[in-house]
Image (cartoon, grey):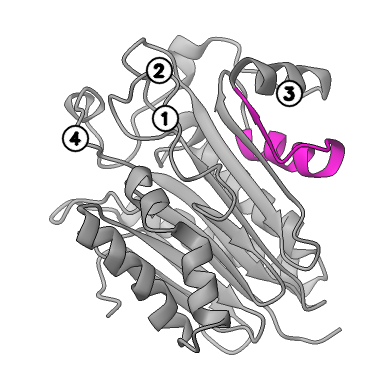
């Protein structure tokens, strides 16, 4: 056990220049302080990233959980994934409906199922069997998150938002978690990169990554695992590894961002959109919470 820890959060790479995100920045700062305290107390990276993402989901401030918009059929379908680095155990759900915390269900898949991903009706059945709280009145539960208008939710130009967390705990273990309501105006059954292990979410013994952006492009660019391999196998620095994949996303026509933590406690956050809501802290770096500050 060491005193080394690191934590990074993102609230999506969909912010628009000129809008005020001070509320989300304050929320992410407060949540990061809570996560810092948990890590210092010895909580595992796996538990901390789940707690962080569950709070981001329930806040209604981001395009995940309570802040998610309906698809073209009027249904809210949610995706989430979580992965533990040293065991490489993973769990995810896709197109799940009417649950308070999709990331909680994803963690239950990791811990209580031989599967890695469970989808749609099967995911809802799994959540019911494991006692997860459901949304009583979907029509009155969901809200528009900060910076999103009703017109935005009706667009089909791949506007997006996702939340995520990556952490290194004092036991030397890494974990990553990601959750999303998907892109606005999405077709029924659409699944992006978030719940696909290796695309939107990844953790191993060396690195933990959570992505946000136009998921189809992240999948086509190789996603989080491409960044991880750049860091582990190609000799990239942590920043270079993130930008290697993100530049390919941009070449293909997409945008977004990603956060990463390494086993040494280094943190990297990259985005090629207008901004990315993000916060981070470690045993060696002061807490930062920002949206538009350049990162390259």
The CA span between labels 1 and 2 is 14 Å
Residue indicated by mark 3: 127
What residue is rendered at 61% in x and 27% in y? 100
The CA span between labels 4 and 3 is 31 Å
Mark 4 vs 3, N-terminal side: 3
Q: Quadrant of residue 104?
A: top right
Q: Nearer the viewer, mark 1 or mark 2?
A: 2
Along the line of sight, which residue is nearer the eye, 193 or 259? Answer: 193
Q: Position of residue 35 (x, y in %)?
A: 65, 63
The CA span between labels 1 and 3 is 19 Å
Asked if marks 2 and 4 touch (Cβ < 8 Å), the reply is no
Q: Nearer the viewer, mark 2 or mark 3?
A: 2
Please give the range of residues in magenta: 102-119
Crowd band around label 3 with a 10 angstrom C-alpha radius: few (<14), some (14–19), many (20+)? many
The CA span between labels 2 and 3 is 20 Å
The question of residue 87 being in magenta is answered with no
Asked if marks 1 and 4 touch (Cβ < 8 Å), the reply is no
Along the line of sight, which residue is nearer the eye, 111 or 285? Answer: 111
Q: Secondary structure at mark 1?
A: loop
Q: Quadrant of residue 221?
A: bottom left
Mark 1 vs 2, N-terminal side: 1
Along the line of sight, which residue is nearer the eye, 132 or 254? Answer: 254
Q: Nearer the viewer, mark 1 or mark 3?
A: 3
Mark 1 vs 4, N-terminal side: 1
Mark 1 vs 3, N-terminal side: 1
Residue indicated by mark 2: 188
Residue indicated by mark 4: 157
The CA span between labels 1 and 4 is 16 Å
Along the line of sight, which residue is nearer the eye, 204 or 79? Answer: 204
What residue is rendered at 75% in x and 55% in y? 47
């Amino acid at each position: 056990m060491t005193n080394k820890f690191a934590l990074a959060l993102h609230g999506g790479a969909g912010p628009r220049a000129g809008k005020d995100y001070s509320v989300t920045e304050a929320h992410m700062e407060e949540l990061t302080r809570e996560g810092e305290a948990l890590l210092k107390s010895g909580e595992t990276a796996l538990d901390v990233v789940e707690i962080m993402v569950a709070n981001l989901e329930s806040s209604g401030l981001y395009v995940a959980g309570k802040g998610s918009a309906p698809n073209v059929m009027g249904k809210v379908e949610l995706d989430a994934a979580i992965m533990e680095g040293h065991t490489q155990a993973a769990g995810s759900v896709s197109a799940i409906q009417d649950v308070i915390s999709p990331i909680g269900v994803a963690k239950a898949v990791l811990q209580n199922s031989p599967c890695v991903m469970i989808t749609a009706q099967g995911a809802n059945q799994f959540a019911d069997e494991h006692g997860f709280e459901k949304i009583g009145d979907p029509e009155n539960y969901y809200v528009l998150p900060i910076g999103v208008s009703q017109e935005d939710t009706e667009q089909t130009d791949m506007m997006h938002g996702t939340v995520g967390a990556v952490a290194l705990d004092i036991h030397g273990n890494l974990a990553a978690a990601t959750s999303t309501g998907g892109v606005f105006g999405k077709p029924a059954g659409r699944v992006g990169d978030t719940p696909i292990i290796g695309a939107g979410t990844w953790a191993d013994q060396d690195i933990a990554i959570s992505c946000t952006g136009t998921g189809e492009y992240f999948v086509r660019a190789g996603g989080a695992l491409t960044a991880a391999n750049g860091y582990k196998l190609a000799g990239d620095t942590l920043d270079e590894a993130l930008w290697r994949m993100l530049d390919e996303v941009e070449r293909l026509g997409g945008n977004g961002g990603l956060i990463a933590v390494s086993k040494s406690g280094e943190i990297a956050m990259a985005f090629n959109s207008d901004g990315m809501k993000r916060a981070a802290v470690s045993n060696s770096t002061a807490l930062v919470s920002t949206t538009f500050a350049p990162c390259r």
